[in-house]
């Protein structure tokens, strides 16, 4: 142990021991030393924000801190753990870190403080001293371990410290397992820079902000450090991406994660959200923003789940004329019930083209839609909208949308493109919430964070693809058809407005526009020559 530079009288020693035991901040600033990475061993001089954290740690049983990098919070908590173990009996302190090296670094901070204190200030003897644990004769101990599924489960803890909790693997499972060890009055300090929206750390912090759990929340961006000015920030952050700056310096959950969409696009989606004008369906989970218009065309795409698991069955209705999601469903019902709901709302929206995902549960949904004689079901390779008698011979193997690894990437890419270019508008808060937790996983796959859902995202991704890419129902085809129809004129005894070589037909532009593409009567007229063959492509 270190020695004091001057002999301290016994009476003064007793006074200092009592004062240190009562005031951890005084203890830090008077007797603690820390190892600076470039300046070597230095006295620990705390900043006001660090003092405030210590006050919060003592005042509240549970504390959760979202912080910038390079604030010295790990050193502060190491000093706090040392103070508690030295001056209080039977304190079992556990630190959980992201990996073994980080856990050992925490213990080294504790040892640096102990090795440079006056011997007379250390009342209990050190009985165990290794790379991961220090025990004292007063029954207190400090142990640091890397994360694992059973971390801390068998402990009866006085204080739990989890460093960089947002990056701890399976933190939700660890927290669930370790929570009961704190029921006898133990305290918890969770520290981390943010790691995107979603996950247990984000949920605990958000709930703390909303005052729906026991945690006291503390937010520490880079600006709280009195030695960090704008010049420091610009120098430190110049080699970081926007996402990394948000994560490492700004304490911004929304912008810090590897979300599928950029923060700007997610913010735009959030800005478009509004309450539905009406609700219907099971549990009022069909949300409607725009009523159907007779002259508009619609597509209905869906993601089908079993109905009794953690996933939801969903569908979206997209207006092909405006690119708006006019209605949305999310709920837990069996595939056949979902088909009945799709049938009901598809008919309301002018016999919308229906295209659910044709996975195992989707097949059951499509089978029920066929039984219901739904008139327009998307089928791969069909040249006209599927109406009337066609449904009787519907090829279920090719109906709906087949999601594979390749097609999944295609539809998600299309969804990102349309949102980025502000060409597809959703007003749904439910869709926005899913986007916030729809992220790039470690295997470079876009998917929902663990414990979250992406059913609305996948449903609208199918809608984005059908709306933009498919030559039969896409926004490009609709726009082009509208322009062509509006340019057509029929004047009695005149050929004005006809294409070169085109014979006059019996339909006015208004009559053409009033019929959905693929209407069987119009197809019959095409075949009989009442509509010139040069225009056949318009109805494919």
Image: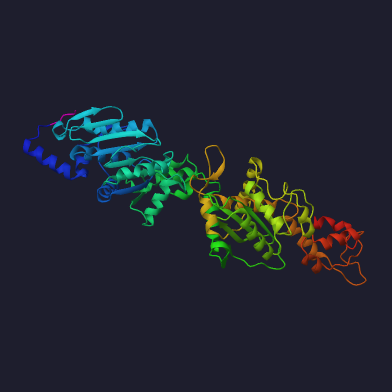
At which x and y percent is residue 491? 88, 71
Q: Is residue 397 visible?
A: yes
Q: Which residues are magenta?
A: 1-5
Judged by its main secondary structure, the magenta piece is: loop
Q: How far from the left and from the top, in percent, is residue 347?
A: 69, 64
Image x and y of residue 148, in percent: 40, 35
In the drawing, does residue 46 fall left or right of residue 410?
left
* Quarter of the picture holding the C terminus: bottom right
**121 above or below 382?**
above
Residue 35 visible (yes or no): no
Above or below: residue 143 compared with residue 206: above
470 vs 413, left or right, is right
Q: Looking at the image, how many numbered discs can be counted on the residues?
A: 0
Give yes or no for residue 3 being in the magenta stretch: yes
State the colouring used for the structure image. Answer: rainbow
Q: Quadrant of residue 181?
A: top left
User: Residue 27 appears in which quarter of the rendering?
Assistant: top left
Instruction: Indicate yes or no whether the magenta region holds residue 246.
Output: no
Given residues 187 and 155, the one toward you in this image is 155
Which residue occupies 38% across, 57% down? 210
User: Residue at left 87%, top 59%?
Assistant: 526
From the viewer's perspective, is 333 left or right of 113? right
- Camera-side residue: 9 or 181? 181
Q: Position of residue 524 (x, y in %)?
A: 86, 60
- x 73%, y 58%: residue: 376
Seen as rendered, the residue at the extreme bottom is 492
Q: Nearer the viewer, residue 489 or 429?
A: 429
Picture quarter with the N terminus: top left
């Amino acid at each position: 142990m270190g020695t004091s530079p001057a002999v301290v009288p016994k009476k003064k020693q007793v006074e200092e021991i009592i004062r240190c035991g009562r005031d951890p901040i005084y203890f830090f600033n008077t007797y603690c030393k820390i190892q600076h990475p470039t300046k070597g061993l230095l006295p620990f001089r705390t900043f006001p924000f660090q003092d405030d954290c210590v006050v919060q740690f003592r005042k509240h049983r549970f504390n959760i801190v979202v912080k910038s990098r390079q604030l010295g919070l790990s050193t502060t908590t190491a000093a706090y753990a040392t103070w508690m173990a030295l001056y209080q009996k039977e304190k079992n302190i556990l630190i959980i870190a992201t990996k073994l090296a980080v856990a050992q670094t925490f213990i080294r901070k504790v040892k640096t403080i102990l090795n440079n204190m006056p011997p007379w200030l250390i009342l209990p003897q050190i009985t165990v001293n290794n790379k991961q644990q220090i025990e004292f004769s007063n029954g207190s101990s400090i142990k640091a371990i890397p994360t694992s599924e059973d971390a801390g489960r068998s402990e009866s803890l006085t204080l739990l410290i989890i460093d960089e909790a947002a990056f701890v693997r399976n933190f939700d499972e660890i927290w669930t397992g370790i929570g009961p060890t704190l029921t006898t009055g133990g305290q918890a300090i969770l520290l981390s820079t943010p790691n995107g929206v979603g996950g247990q750390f984000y949920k605990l912090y958000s709930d703390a902000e909303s005052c729906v759990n026991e945690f006291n929340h503390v937010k520490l961006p880079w600006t709280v450090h009195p030695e960090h000015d704008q010049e420091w920030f610009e120098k430190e952050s110049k080699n970081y991406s926007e996402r990394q700056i948000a994560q490492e310096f700004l304490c911004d959950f929304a912008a810090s994660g590897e979300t599928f969409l950029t923060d700007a696009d997610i913010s735009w989606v959030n800005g478009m959200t509004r309450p539905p004008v009406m609700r219907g369906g099971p549990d009022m989970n069909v949300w409607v923003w725009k009523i159907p218009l007779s002259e508009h065309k619609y597509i209905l795409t869906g993601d089908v789940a079993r109905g009794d698991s953690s996933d939801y069955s969903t569908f979206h209705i997209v207006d092909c004329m405006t690119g708006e999601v006019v209605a949305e469903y999310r709920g837990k019902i069996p595939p056949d019930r979902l088909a009945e709901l799709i049938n009901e709302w598809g008919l309301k929206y002018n016999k919308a083209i229906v295209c659910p995902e044709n996975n195992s549960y989707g097949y059951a949904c499509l089978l029920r839609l066929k039984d219901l004689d739904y008139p327009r079901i998307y089928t791969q390779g069909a040249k006209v909208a599927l109406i009337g008698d066609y449904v009787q011979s519907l090829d279920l193997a090719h109906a709906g949308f087949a999601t594979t690894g390749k097609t999944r990437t295609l539809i998600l890419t299309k969804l990102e493109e349309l949102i980025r270019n502000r060409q597809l508008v959703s007003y749904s808060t439910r869709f926005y919430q899913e986007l916030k937790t729809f992220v790039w996983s470690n295997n470079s796959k876009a998917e929902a964070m663990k414990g979250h859902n992406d059913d609305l995202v996948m449903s609208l991704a199918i809608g984005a693809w059908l709306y933009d890419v498919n030559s039969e129902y896409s926004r490009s085809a609709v726009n082009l058809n509208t322009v062509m129809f509006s340019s057509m004129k029929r004047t009695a005894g005149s050929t004005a407005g006809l294409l070169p070589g085109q014979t006059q037909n019996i339909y006015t532009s208004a009559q053409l526009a009033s019929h959905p593409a693929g209407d069987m009567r119009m197809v019959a007229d095409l075949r009989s020559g009442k509509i010139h063959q040069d225009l056949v492509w318009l109805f494919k």
